[in-house]
Image (cartoon, helix red, strand yellow):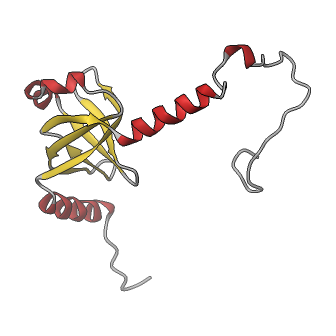
Amino acid sequence: MKGLKASSVTEVVSSIKNSLEKEYFNLTILGEVSNLSLSSAGHYYFNLSDKNCSISCALFKMDALRNPAIRKIKNGAKVLLRGPISVYAKRGTFQVICKSIIPYGEGDLKAQFDFLKEKLNSQGYFDPQKKQLIPTLPTRIAIITALQGAAL
């Protein structure tokens, strides 16, 4: 392919990184926390979601110390956060680097989940007396998937 100029992966990721970080340097976002985890180094990682989308977020240890409310935030909480977009070039992924986080009540997704859970509970789906034991040696096994599904 003579004459074809191809960019390196580094060039492409660097260009995207520069564009995103220049454009989105001070975001304020309202959303619902999910997949909240605390690393052994003291950093918090979580997703911030609404009914249509999700974005990865990180609250690093020093910012967490300035935001003690993070210790009370649980999955399903609605929060207001502020911070820039950052691109992690090694993986080619982006996330919001949370600089401040404020609890904003219970999230809509959590409320919907709790409503569904209560509905199914009232219909007896979680009743231990209605559960069947899985046989030690099953006589039939079924796979329900698409014809070209990975399960096959």
Q: Where 136 sits versus 118, above or below? A: above
Q: Quadrant of the N terminus?
A: bottom left
Residue in the foreground of this view, choosing between 124 and 102: 124
User: Is any part of residue 119 visible from this angle?
Assistant: yes
Report the number of discs.
0
Q: Where 64 sits versus 131, above or below? A: below
Name, please, the residue furthest toward the front. 122
Q: Is residue 7 left or right of residue 63?
A: right
Q: Where 77 sits versus 40, above or below? A: below
Quadrant of res 41 = top left
Q: Where is residue 145 drawn, in percent x and y?
A: 74, 48
Residue at (31, 36) in percent of width and height: 46
Q: Where is residue 131 drawn, in percent x and y?
A: 73, 19
Quadrant of res 126 = top right
Q: Is residue 86 left or right of residue 120?
A: left
Residue at (27, 51) in percent of width and height: 89
Name, please, the residue furthest toward the right. 139
Name, please, the residue furthest toward the bottom. 3
Q: Where is residue 122 drawn, in percent x and y?
A: 60, 26
Residue in the foreground of this view, choosing between 10 and 48: 48
Residue at (19, 51) in percent of width and height: 85
